Amino acid sequence: MLYRTMPKNGDRLSILGFGCMRLPATPEGAIDEPRAIAQIRAAIDAGVNYVDTAWPYHAGASEPLLGKALRDGYRARVKLATKLPSWLVTSRADMDRFLDAQLSRLGTDHIDYYLVHALDGPLWDAVASHGVAEFLDAAKADGRIVNAGFSFHGLLPDFKRIVDAYPWVFCQIQYNYLDQQFQAGTEGLRYAAAKGLGVVVMEPLRGGMLARPAPAPAIAALWDAAEARREPVDWALRWVWNHPEVTLLLSGMNEEAHIAQNVAVAGQALPGGLTDPETALVDRVATAYKELLKVGCTGCGYCMPCPMGVQIPKCFDAYNALHMNGDADSAKFRYVVSVGGVIGVDAPGFATQCVACGECLEKCPQHIEIPEVLKSVVAGLEDEGVPARMEMARKMFKVRPQ
């Protein structure tokens, strides 16, 4: 296992972190506790020393499960990360209630890396108005948390102002070779690193899509032409770790073979370890993937705000996921979570809200026929199952401490 140093505190962290959002499940959908605990402990035994969870993962069951996995001496061997569910915060007191409940769930007296979860611009403004800076300062002072950070799912300008708004130790962004200009992207990665923040990368495999066999012959041919023969997952992880600004990446490992594979690559992937021809090859693969995308949206957000409240970039991201990930159920659930008002602002931003006013058309630098494409989003993602998915999402993301 290779390790990198968190810039502001000197912590030596494994470049591979264990993400507890997609733990193995029983046929009934509950976490398979014996197997999940064994997997987490096996990863720690292999050198992983950063584990990440959050309040809503597995409908609230992830934190308690991780607490069990870290018994028997494992807690002392890792840095533990979890997150404040910022979309549920309505007061300064809420923040303490959530943190205290999480400490109890996890069976610990402190969180090593505590994140304000899933921020975008409006959500940051909301939690800032409720005193999140004072909360983080107080929680650090009394020892309940050690390091403060945030995870991000918004637009680049908002990412930069959040970076500058508080003395964060670290941040967490979505980053992979397809998402170099999505959300924070490469520019955000470099901006945060230049400010001294450690950067934790989520979705390095884009929900597993980049780990699967190539979805088109053209992509398979590109990989086959490489001088070094590697599996797609190997290329994707090495590409992220090739960036010296990245402190570590999180992998949602739920198969024993995946853990072994990820750990093996994490023992070899040095920053700058890919050659120039290899990075050029990955860029060609990224271009080939993007040619398969249904919408050429970069997530720049220039089309926003929509006068009808449509979350246009998020609609397009979910629509692309529907066609690229090979998992329609997951894409449809992701859609209602991201645009249904479950996280962030309470108002929904579904594609069906579009009235084809055309205001977005002149703003889009990609010249996407946005109203027409939103009709396709409706056809692909807004079926009769939307109410049930909304109810499931509310149960998962709206649970408050008792």
Image (cartoon, rainbow, N blue to C red):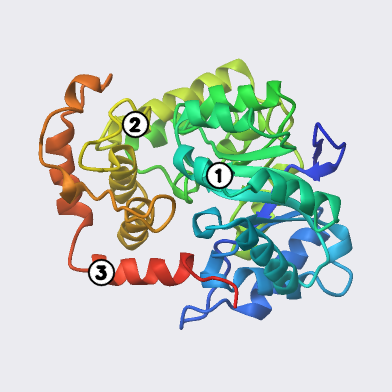
Q: Is residue 2 left or right of residue 102?
A: right
Q: Earlier in the sequence, mark 3 or mark 1?
A: 1
Name the secondary structure under disc 3: helix
Find residue 374 and report its image quarter. Answer: top left
Q: Residues within 10 Å of mark 1 (few under 14, many from 20)?
A: few
Which residue matches tag 2?
290
Work out whether 145 lies above or below 156. Answer: below
Camera-nearest label, 2 or 3? 3
Q: Are marks 3 and 1 in contact (CB under 8 Å)?
A: no
Find residue 383 and report its image quarter. Answer: bottom left
* Residue 163 image point, x, y percent: 62, 31
Q: Residues within 10 Å of mark 2 (few under 14, many from 20)?
A: some
- The amino acid beneath tag 3 is Pro
Q: Residues within 10 Å of mark 3 (few under 14, many from 20)?
A: few
Which residue matches tag 3?
387
**Looking at the image, can residue 273 be seen?**
no
Q: Are marks 2 and 3 in contact (CB under 8 Å)?
A: no
What residue lies at 51% left-to-right and 29% top-to-bottom?
Answer: 185
Which residue matches tag 1?
129
Q: Is residue 282 left or right of residue 35?
A: left
Q: Nearer the viewer, residue 379 or 402?
A: 402
Q: Nearer the viewer, residue 191 or 68?
A: 191
